[in-house]
Image: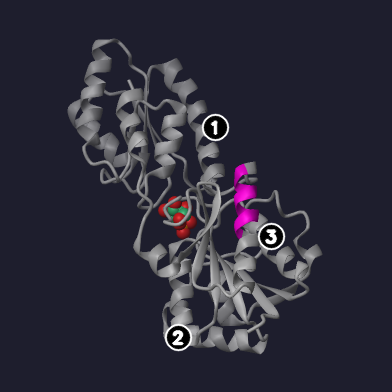
């Protein structure tokens, strides 16, 4: 079937670069002389019929902006068949033939289920700061998020150094340790705690003892929010059981990691995947996430994306031990 009307939505947590991807999707659709629609607030807007037609000019001047002009949501109603039925009825009202969803694995799961229910073709692009998706070396927003975290941790190091203090910095990432790993390595953190690596707490204890011997009193621990130690407060409590006089401070970076102008790398990734998602749909592809693997566009079926995660590279895992002294 030749598509005439294609929609785009952003779904799940926002990430820097989503706007660049919306722009690429809309402009590619318009390049082919077709109609582009924006669905507001993710799948929730699809259920509520919050759908607007978009022209090329409507996506001017958004490439460099964080957040998403289409707004986003995590829709509980879309998990129900009744919700998805309403969403389907609204797509039909606008004669929408297929859509591109920019989001994480929950968004792919939604699109897959929707296809099983109503046979509506869709493609996804990897929009999440967490970098936890199989099918793309990097996700849209990850590079910006780690640069934001690096900027913050560098500043924290100044105070850690001046006061000879230990800082525990908690970063986002949900169940994945990518943000902690990359920002920790890039800032020379003395310890990095991530869910993918289990033995790390004992090492922290030993390293503090070793540092104390060497009179090295300042130290930075970067902990992923999803680490089995349960975040910065738990790490601090645990350490104080061993070192009651530890002069420690906690810094939880939080949502600053989700905002801000996307880096060049994120703008390019967003533009490449947005363009390839539309080209894929027009060439008869569907039910796949577009990613970039080894600098090549790659289409990974949704059922693989939702089953797999992206394992951390062995050399990076090893570097945690080797470089942090
Ligand atoms: O998935 C992106 C993310 O920022 C995670 O890193 C974090 O765990 C979660 O979203 C926070 O979600 P919310 O903004 O809904 O609190």
Percent coordinates x, y for residue 219 in the rendering: 36, 23
Ligand 1 within 8 A of label 2's CB? no
Residue 193 in the image: above or below residue 55: above
Q: Main secondary structure of the magenta part?
A: helix
Q: Of the residues under marks 1 and 2, which one precedes in the sequence?
A: 2
Q: Of the residues under marks 1 and 3, which one precedes in the sequence?
A: 3
Q: Nearer the viewer, residue 184 or 112?
A: 112
Residue 115 in the image: above or below residue 179: below
Q: Residue at x 43, y 17 (%)?
A: 161
125 on left or right of 50: left
Work out whether residue 147 can be spotted. yes
Which one is closest to the eye, mark 1 or mark 2?
Answer: 2
Which contiguous range is marked in magenta? 265-273
Instruction: Tell me the number on the disc at residue 112.
Output: none
What element does badge 3 sit on? helix
Where is mark 3, residue-wise? 24
What crowding class fits label 1: few (fewer than 14 Cα within 10 Å), some (14-19), or many (20 or more)? Answer: few
Instruction: Tell me the number on the disc at residue 117.
Output: 2
Ligand 1 within 8 A of label 1's CB? no
Instruction: Tell me the number on the disc at residue 151.
Output: 1
What element does badge 2 sit on? helix
What crowding class fits label 2: few (fewer than 14 Cα within 10 Å), some (14-19), or many (20 or more)? Answer: few
Residue 88 in the image: above or below residue 300: below
Q: Of the residues under marks 3 and 2, which one precedes in the sequence?
A: 3
207 on left or right of 265: left
Q: CA distance from mark 1 to mark 3?
A: 29 Å
* Location of residue 53 by image quarter: bottom right
Q: Nearer the viewer, residue 152 or 6?
A: 6
Percent coordinates x, y for residue 160 in the rendering: 42, 22
Q: Residue at x 60, y 47 (%)?
A: 266
Percent coordinates x, y for residue 47 in the rendering: 55, 81
């Amino acid at each position: 079937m030749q598509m005439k009307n294609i929609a785009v939505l952003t779904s799940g947590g926002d990430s820097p670069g989503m706007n660049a991807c919306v722009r690429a999707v809309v402009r590619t659709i318009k390049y082919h002389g077709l109609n582009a629609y924006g669905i507001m607030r993710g799948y929730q807007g699809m259920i509520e019929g919050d759908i607007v037609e978009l022209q090329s000019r409507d996506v001017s001047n958004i490439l460099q902006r964080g957040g998403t002009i289409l707004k986003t949501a995590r829709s509980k109603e879309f998990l129900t068949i009744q919700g998805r039925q309403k969403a389907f009825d609204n797509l039909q009202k606008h004669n929408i033939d297929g859509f591109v969803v920019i989001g994480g694995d929950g968004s792919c799961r939604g699109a897959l289920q929707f296809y099983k229910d109503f046979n509506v073709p869709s493609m996804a692009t990897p929009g999440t700061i967490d970098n936890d998706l199989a099918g793309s070396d990097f996700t849209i927003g990850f590079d910006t998020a780690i640069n934001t975290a690096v900027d913050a941790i560098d500043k924290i190091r100044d105070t850690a150094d001046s006061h000879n203090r230990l800082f525990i910095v908690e970063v986002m990432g949900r169940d994945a340790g990518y943000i902690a790993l990359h920002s920790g390595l890039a800032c020379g953190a003395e310890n990095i705690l991530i869910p993918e690596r289990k033995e790390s707490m004992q090492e922290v204890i030993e390293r503090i003892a070793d540092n104390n011997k060497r009179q090295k009193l300042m130290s930075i621990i970067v902990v992923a929010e999803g680490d089995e130690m349960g975040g910065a407060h738990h790490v601090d409590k645990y350490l104080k059981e061993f070192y009651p006089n530890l002069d420690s401070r906690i810094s939880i970076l939080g949502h600053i990691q989700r905002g801000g102008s996307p880096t060049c790398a994120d703008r390019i990734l967003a533009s490449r995947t947005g363009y390839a998602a539309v080209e894929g749909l027009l060439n008869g592809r569907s039910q796949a996430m577009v990613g970039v693997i080894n600098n090549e566009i790659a289409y990974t079926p949704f059922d693989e994306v939702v089953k797999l995660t992206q394992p951390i590279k062995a050399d990076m895992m090893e570097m945690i031990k080797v470089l942090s002294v």
